Image (cartoon, grey):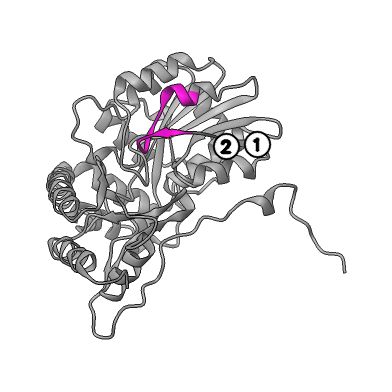
């Protein structure tokens, strides 16, 4: 029987897999710590702005996200014409790949980089080239060593998901200087709001001052608008123009747009979340390390824990935690079969993770 066949390469792509649905012991409360969602939800300003759109759900949104682009421009000192908004930064990453990658091209991502990068690359017929990392951190020299005449794009999450590590501004600048001018550098700064390091740069400066760098951002993390799917990118005018030519005409809903405007106006909500997260990153890292579990230093709102390949394994720990209502993220599909990623949750959830891991490490078996 004849039937439609996907274009070459599509069925070779490993689909993105979100966190699992928990199966907990009866009567247990569930704590979802697998999706890097904020425990605080959106700010009251974002909720109020969202509510104003309810009376006009029959209307199409303004097609260019003008009100949000202008709000972002005012907040960060940017030209709104150099901003493009999308249904989460995922849509923007896919638009970038669609514009700049095709059969015969190569794009570079890192060993434990965000899974959307190879998906977007391969979906457009290009080859995903993987650069090794050093101590779960992106390595500039390793990326540069992967460059060939076919390289058209470099994907770089900074901070990186799922490792929580980052490159300082000096290394990002060294990477840009070492890449050929025709290679587009995509700096994915989804978690930048959580970073408190003085040598960190969220990518805006390079995107302002070069013709071959863009920076992407999301409202799904610190702003708590994951359900609305809203993100944005700043970059050179010629890149934004090319992307707008294939962007869907109403790709951002009015409720998402207005909620995002309210969110960026509430700087106090962001600072509160940043302070809380940094505090608990420190506490959890210290307490979990005391248990004999290695933790990769993180600047984001999650941390990566490493378990032995035998004995009390990551899979054993995951099952133990899940039965007690603590849902973490297995990261085998990121090339980390012996690790678990944990989102910073409420105080109650964070303390329960420490207590449960202590119980797990003291138990006679992994189960």
Please, is residue 13 above or below residue 1 in the view?
A: above
Q: Quadrant of the N terminus?
A: bottom right
Q: Circle 2 sits on which residue? A: 97
Asked if disc 1 and disc 2 are in contact, CB closer than 8 Å, the reply is yes
State the residue at coordinates (16%, 66%).
352
Percent coordinates x, y for residue 321 in the rendering: 28, 69
Percent coordinates x, y for residue 87 in the rendering: 45, 49
> What segment is highlighted magenta in the picture?
132-143
State the residue at coordinates (58%, 53%).
14
Q: Based on the picture, tell me whether residue 141 belongs to the magenta stretch.
A: yes
Q: Is residue 169 left or right of residue 234?
A: left
Q: Based on the picture, tell me whether residue 153 belongs to the magenta stretch.
A: no
Please, is residue 158 above or below residue 277 in the view?
A: above
| Helix, strand or loop under label 2 | helix
Q: Is residue 52 left or right of residue 206?
A: left
Percent coordinates x, y for residue 245 in the rendering: 59, 35
In-front residue for pair 61/263? 263
Q: Mark 1 packing: few (<14 Cα in 10 Å), some, or many (20+)?
A: many
Residue 236 appears in the figure? no
Q: Mark 2 packing: few (<14 Cα in 10 Å), some, or many (20+)?
A: many
Q: Circle 1 sits on which residue? A: 126
Residue 256 appears in the figure? yes
In-front residue for pair 299/202? 299
Image quadrant where residue 319 sits: bottom left
Percent coordinates x, y for residue 74 in the rendering: 27, 31
Q: Which circle, 1 or 2, is nearer the viewer?
A: 1
């Amino acid at each position: 029987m004849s039937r439609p066949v996907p274009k070459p390469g599509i069925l070779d792509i490993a689909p993105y897999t979100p966190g699992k649905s928990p199966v907990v012991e009866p009567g247990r409360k569930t704590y979802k710590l697998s999706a890097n969602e904020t425990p605080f939800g959106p700010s009251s300003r974002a909720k109020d702005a969202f509510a104003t759109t309810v009376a006009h759900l029959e209307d199409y949104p303004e097609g260019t996200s003008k009100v949000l682009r202008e709000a972002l421009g005012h907040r960060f000192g940017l030209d709104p014409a150099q901003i493009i908004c999308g249904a989460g930064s995922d849509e923007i990453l896919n638009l970038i790949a669609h514009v700049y990658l095709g059969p015969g091209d190569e794009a570079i991502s890192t060993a434990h980089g965000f899974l959307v990068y190879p998906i977007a690359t391969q979906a457009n017929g290009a080859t995903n080239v993987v650069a090794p990392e050093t101590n779960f951190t992106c390595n500039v020299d390793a990326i540069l060593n992967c460059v060939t005449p076919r390289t058209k794009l470099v994907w770089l999450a900074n901070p990186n998901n799922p490792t929580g590590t980052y490159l300082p501004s000096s290394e990002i600048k060294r990477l840009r200087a070492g890449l050929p001018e025709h290679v587009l550098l995509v700096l994915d700064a989804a978690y930048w709001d959580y970073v408190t390091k003085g040598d960190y740069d969220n990518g805006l400066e390079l995107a302002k001052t070069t013709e071959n760098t863009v920076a992407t951002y999301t409202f799904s993390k610190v702003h708590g608008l994951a359900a609305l799917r809203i993100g944005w990118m700043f970059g050179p005018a010629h890149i934004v123009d090319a992307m707008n030519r294939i962007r869907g005409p109403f790709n951002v809903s009015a409720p998402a747009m207005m909620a995002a405007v309210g969110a960026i106006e509430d700087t106090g909500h962001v600072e509160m979340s940043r302070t809380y997260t940094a505090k608990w990153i420190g506490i959890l890292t210290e307490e979990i390390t005391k248990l004999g579990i290695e933790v990769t230093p993180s600047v984001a709102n999650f941390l990566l824990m490493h378990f032995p390949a035998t004995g009390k394994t990551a899979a054993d720990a995951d099952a133990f935690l899940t039965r007690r209502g603590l849902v973490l993220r297995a990261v085998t599909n990121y090339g980390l079969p012996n690790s678990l990623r944990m989102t910073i949750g409420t105080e109650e959830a964070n303390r329960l993770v420490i207590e449960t891991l202590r119980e797990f490490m003291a138990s006679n078996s992994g189960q």
